[in-house]
Image: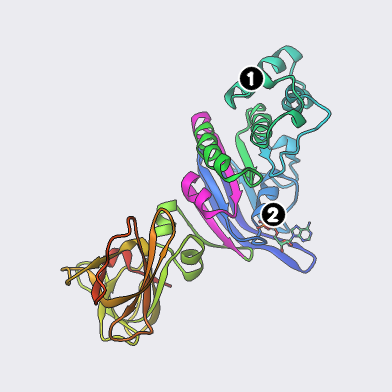
């Protein structure tokens, strides 16, 4: 199923939950809504499910407008954060519920319930009650209950947030494989950027009821459009700069770093004009240490001010030799003996992202 949202607006009294949401989700796409608490992602999912109606705008499933179509007629299956299983029913009865209300015969019901439970590796738990299952198993039952109706759209609202860290990691790839193997269009809500980066085909970053940016995980992480997206998706360094001019041929921009007598080259998705004040983002892992300049790389002569051991990596802070106010953080996979004196920090122009 293809999903299209046009100019969706939703408010609760004076609170505007969604301002002007427009996006398209392709058939078979695993699409994520990512953003901090209160940004409107659950509201958007509930609008898709049909639990709420938008104040204005249109929701289209395969070109068909959904206004006034109740949840059970939308052919979507929802997985809730708190599982929402009925404690008095067995696992099998929980999963069968959606089929029974749709009038599926008891013989077919039984085989489809077994098939759905087998899919989530819980075929042998059909007669247990939810209380006799672990959190991860309960979440799998919730997934089976959503999938058993063979939905064209699967909606998942922070399905992993009640699980411990190790199980969350395991379930990430399990859910993604399942959804992709079945070929469902799916929309997944989370505030966990690592979950979104690891699982999504594409993702929309939301803030205060608006979409800040839509892209693949790599596009969003490597080419953030603005400061919010850059910071929300992970650690980064910001440097203030002024645009000098566009370089002919490469498409890169020449920049003068603020407070430093250095010219760098950076990449931008937006057209920029000479003299414009901008912010540049460089991810810590994109910075290398070199004892001398490297052709074609942006360079900053700097000296190490501190190092913090983080387990899998060590994070170093360097300050510019010429101007101690400019500092950059970088990561090293293995903490090596770094020179005590000045070094050159190097970053590729493609990793020097000019934000709008
Ligand atoms: P979280 O990650 O904390 O669940 P969210 O991004 O899913 O947050 P929403 O639950 O969609 O955010 O809420 C968006 C805004 O709308 C918030 O300011 C919230 O307080 C408000 N809101 C949501 N539901 C209601 C409601 N039923 N009545 C009043 N305000 C609501």
Q: Is residue 340 above or below residue 49?
A: below
Instruction: Specify the quadrant of the image occupied by residue 205.
Output: bottom right
The answer as to whether callout 2 falls within 8 Å of ligand 1 is: yes
Q: Please identify, in this view, whether the residue under mark 1 or under mark 2 is nearer the observer.
A: 1
User: Is 194 one of the magenta-colored residues?
Assistant: yes
Residue 114, image x, y percentages: 65, 18
Residue 217, image x, y percentages: 44, 52
Q: How is the image coloured?
A: rainbow
Q: Which of 335 and 166 is in front in this view?
A: 335
Q: Nearer the viewer, residue 256 or 51?
A: 256
Q: How far is disc 1 from disc 2 in space, using C-alphas?
A: 33 Å
Question: Label 1 belongs to which residue?
Answer: 123
Question: Label 2 belongs to which residue?
Answer: 43
Give neighbour class at mark 2: few <14, some 14-19, many 20+ (Cα, 10 Å): many
Q: What stretch is highlighted in magenta?
A: 180-207
- 227 vs 95, left or right, is left
């Amino acid at each position: 199923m293809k999903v299209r949202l046009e100019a969706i607006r939703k408010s609760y009294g004076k609170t505007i939950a969604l301002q002007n949401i427009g996006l398209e989700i392709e058939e078979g796409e695993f699409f994520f809504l990512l953003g901090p608490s209160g940004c409107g992602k659950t509201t958007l999912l509930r609008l898709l499910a049909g639990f709420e109606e938008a104040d204005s705008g249109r929701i289209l499933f395969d070109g068909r407008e959904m206004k006034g179509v109740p949840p059970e007629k939308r052919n979507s299956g929802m997985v809730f954060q708190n599982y929402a299983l009925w404690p008095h029913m067995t696992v099998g009865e929980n999963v069968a519920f959606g089929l029974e209300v749709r009038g599926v015969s008891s013989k077919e019901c039984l085989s489809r319930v077994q098939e759905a439970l087998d899919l989530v590796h819980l075929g042998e738990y059909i007669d247990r009650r939810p209380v006799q299952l672990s959190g991860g198993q309960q979440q799998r039952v919730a997934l089976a209950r959503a999938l058993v109706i063979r939905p064209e759209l699967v909606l998942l609202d922070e399905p992993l947030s009640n699980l411990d860290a190790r199980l969350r990691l395991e379930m990430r790839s399990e859910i993604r494989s399942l959804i992709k193997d079945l070929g469902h269009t799916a929309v997944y809500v989370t505030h966990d950027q690592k979950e979104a980066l690891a699982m999504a085909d594409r993702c929309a970053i939301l803030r205060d009821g608006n979409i800040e940016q839509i892209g693949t995980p790599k596009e969003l992480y490597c080419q953030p459009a603005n400061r919010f997206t850059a910071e929300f998706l992970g650690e980064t360094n910001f440097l203030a700069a002024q645009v000098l001019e566009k370089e002919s041929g490469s498409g890169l921009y020449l920049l003068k770093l603020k407070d430093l007598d250095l010219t760098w080259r950076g990449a931008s998705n937006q057209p920029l004009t000479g003299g414009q004040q901008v912010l540049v983002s460089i991810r810590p892992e994109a910075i290398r240490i070199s004892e001398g300049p490297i052709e074609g790389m942006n360079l900053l002569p700097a000296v190490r001010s501190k190092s913090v051991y983080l387990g899998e990596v060590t994070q170093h802070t360097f300050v510019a030799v010429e101007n101690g106010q400019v500092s950059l953080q970088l990561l090293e996979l293995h903490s090596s003996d770094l020179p005590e004196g000045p070094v050159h920090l190097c970053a590729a122009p493609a990793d020097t992202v000019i934000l709008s």
